[in-house]
Image (cartoon, rainbow, N blue to C red):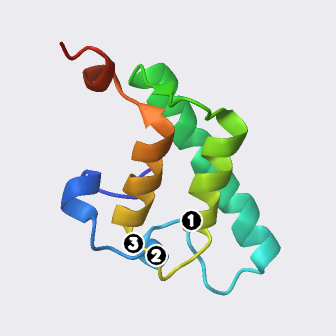
Amino acid sequence: MHQLVTNFEDSGNLQIKDLTFYNPLNSSTLRMQEAGIVADHLDNVFRFGRGAVYERDVDRTIAITAMVNVLIDGEKLVSDLADVVDQCYLFWNEFHRN
């Protein structure tokens, strides 16, 4: 996707509008579609590439919608996206703790 060259932690203060997909000249409809594509890709990477599962009471629709709501707001930060991701996904290291 090449949106970031670092991880969430190192990129937390970047604004969403600084990501390569975000184009402030796009219509809100097109921005929503593009954010949906990014969220869909992230969901697949997290679940199939990183072995994450959804948190309790979260499903694909909820997770994608939550990410899109951040991704369409250019003033939000990457750390805001990371917070939403953490609320929606349980990553391998979280559910394999003793």
Quadrant the C terminus occupies: top left
Query: Relative to residue 8, is residue 32 drawn left or right?
Result: right
Compared with 59, 25 (above or below) is: below
Q: Which residue is mark 2?
A: 76
Label 3–label 1 contact, CB within 8 A? no
Q: Earlier in the sequence, mark 3 or mark 1?
A: 1
Residue plotted at (56% across, 65% down):
71
Q: Which residue is mark 3?
A: 77
Compared with 25, 76 (above or below) is: above
Query: Relative to residue 22, is residue 13 drawn left or right?
Result: left
Q: Which amino acid type is marked by label 1?
A: Leu
Residue 92 placement (x, y as % from top left): 32, 20
The foreground one among 30 and 72 is 72
Compared with 82, 89 (above or below) is: above
Circle 3 Cα neighbour tier, 10 Å, few/some/many (<14 / 14–19 / ≥20)? many
Give the Cα separation between the discs numbered 2 and 1: 8 Å
Q: Quadrant of residue 91?
A: top left
Label 2–label 3 contact, CB within 8 A? yes
Give the Cα separation between the discs numbered 3 and 1: 9 Å
Count of numbered badges drawn on the protein: 3
